Every structure is written in structure tokens, then in C-alpha cells.
Image: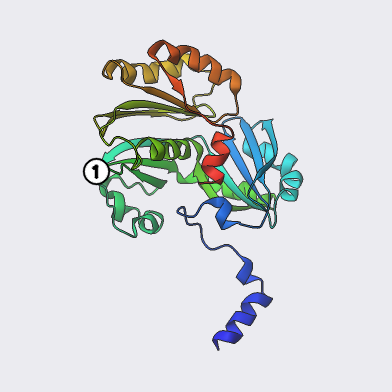
Amino acid sequence: MPLLDDIKSVLSFAAFRPEPDDAEVPWNKRFQGRRSLLLNVSRGHVSWRSLNKKGRFQDAGNSEGEFAEVAPQRAEEWRTLTEGGWVNVSINNRFIISLENNLSRRENSGELLRSNPRAVIGAKFDRGKRYALFHHPHSTASLLMACDDSMVKTTEEVLRANGLKGGRICCGLFALLEQKLTELCGSKQDPNASFVIIACCEGSIAALVQQAGQWTDLRCRSGIGSESLDAMIQIIAPLVQKAQPGTPVYFVHDGNDPKFATVMMEQLSKVGGKDITTEDQLWSAIGLN
């Protein structure tokens, strides 16, 4: 019977459907050999970048407006940039990132976080949230991202209504932090290093302090808007001021708003800030990692 089941699977195209999302598998590997689309959704703005069959970036664009308004106008274009309508959506509103300690790191914790998050995060669990985790490699600290479940469901509904399929829905700011912290705290780095990292993505911001190899403080706000620079500075200033003199200050941003990045760096340069953003930073964070 196994052979017959395999034949039925091929005839029904079930064999070609992606497996349920596994965040451990990079998006470009999950859809290797097929065109797909990366969408970045924030409050009042949508941007996108396509990946070709070789996993390389191609078409790009952006539109002002809420996602539910932009999607019907752009759906036909977006569908032509994919095979099967599969998209990876980064949402940048209605979430919070917090600093936690002693959360479960059992082997299957990633799957449990999707199916039974209470088993991983305990008392922090809220039925109305979706979660993601990133663990410090050398300590018991973790970053916990909690996004409104209603935000995820609304995004999925908009995609379905416009002939698109959400293969993955993630948080762009969290992806940026995860990518850069992997570099800064990797095995080749000093495990006792100190730094402040400030990440901005489409009007949301997070600032994390590491002192002597330990994550000690975190501030996060989503949906502020990139025009609210003063509000962002007020969030990060106390953390930078508390850091030991000479502590490196790193800045990473989505790479889609050069004007905002320039103005932010004018402020951060006063404390020796260094921009560690690379080309296509956000798209590589959600599409290649």
C-alpha cells in the first residue's frame, strides 16, 4: 500500500505542498527551486521583494496604506512573482519583545512553542498571542517575542482573500535582532563581550544591552513610526547612558529607509554608534535565514 499512497500523493499534488512551517529551515531552502515573495507589513506601509528560483533577490516595490487596502491593488502583481502564491510575511505592529530567563530549551521546544506554548514559557503564556524565542548561547537568558494572534489571523485572511498563501508569518524586528545577535554572540566572539544593539524595522524599535556576556536590559516598542525619531531616542537613551563607558553601540535597520537611517546615525554617532546594517538587511533576515 505505501507505493499506492505515494502515487495518490503525486496525482493529488500533495507531494508538492510545503510542509508545515519550520522556523529552523531558511525560507529560501524551504522553497528551493521555486519563486516566492517576501512581504513586509507595517502600520500604513507595505514593501516587498521577490526571490527567484535560485534564491536571489529580484523585483522590489512598496506602497503606502494599510495591508488590507494595498493587497487587492497589488495581488495580481504579487502572484506573478511566485509559484503557487507562496509568501513570507514580516509584520511590524502589535508585538512586544521581552527579556526572559530560564525558559525551556528542551530539544522539541520549537515545536512546543507552536503547539503548546504554555509548556515552554509557563506563566508568561497568553492565549491571545503567538510566540517566537531566541536563546543566548552562553547564558540562561532568552528573547521572547509575543505578537497578537488577531494580527496574524487578519494577515492570513487578507492573503487568502487575494489568492496568496502564507507559508510563514514572522516579525521583521525580531528577525533582525536574531540575525545580528547570532553574529555578535557566536562561538568565534568573546563570550564576555559588552555591547548595546539598537534595531529598527519599519517604525518599530528594540534596544538590548549585554554586559560582560550577560543580557541585562531590553526596551521595545512596536508601531511608533519612523517619523517619531524623538520617541525612539527617548526609549534607547537610558540604556545607552547606563552602559559602561566605551561599550560599543551597534545599529541595525531594515535598509528600506536611508533617510531615517541617516538621521538616526547622526544621533548615535554622538555615543560612538556603528551602523552594522548590510545590503538587503531585512530581506536576508527573513528570506535567507
- Residue 165: give x, y in percent of width and height: 63, 54
Q: Secondary structure at mark 1?
A: loop
- Residue 191: give x, y in percent of width and height: 27, 37
Q: Can residue 167 be seen in this snapshot?
A: no
Q: Judge from the rendering whether residue 19 lies leftward or rightward of residue 77; answer left or right.
A: left
- At label 1, counting other C-alpha atoms closer than 10 Å, the crowd grade (few under 14, some 14-19, many 20 or more) is some
Residue at horizontal 42 percent and vertical 18 percent from the top: 273
Residue at horizontal 72 percent and vertical 48 percent from the top: 81
Residue at horizontal 49 percent and vertical 55 percent from the top: 25
- Residue 264: give x, y in percent of width and height: 49, 17
Where, by quadrant of the figure, is residue 261 drawn? top right
The residue carrying mark 1 is 140
Total tally of numbered discs in the picture: 1
In the image, residue 250 sits, relative to residue 34, either above or below, namely above
Q: Amino acid at mark 1?
A: Thr
Relative depth, front residue between 248 and 108: 248
- Residue 248: give x, y in percent of width and height: 35, 22
In the image, residue 124 sits, relative to residue 268, either above or below, namely below
Q: Judge from the rendering whether residue 166 lies leftward or rightward of residue 170; answer left or right.
A: right
Q: Judge from the rendering whether residue 185 lies leftward or rightward of residue 82; answer left or right.
A: left
In this picture the colour scheme is: rainbow
Relative depth, front residue between 173 and 183: 183
Q: Farthest residue toward the bottom? A: 1
Relative depth, front residue between 121 and 24: 24
Q: Farthest residue toward the front? A: 188
Q: Can residue 27 be seen in this snapshot?
A: yes
Q: Quadrant of the N terminus?
A: bottom right
Q: Farthest residue toward the top? A: 270
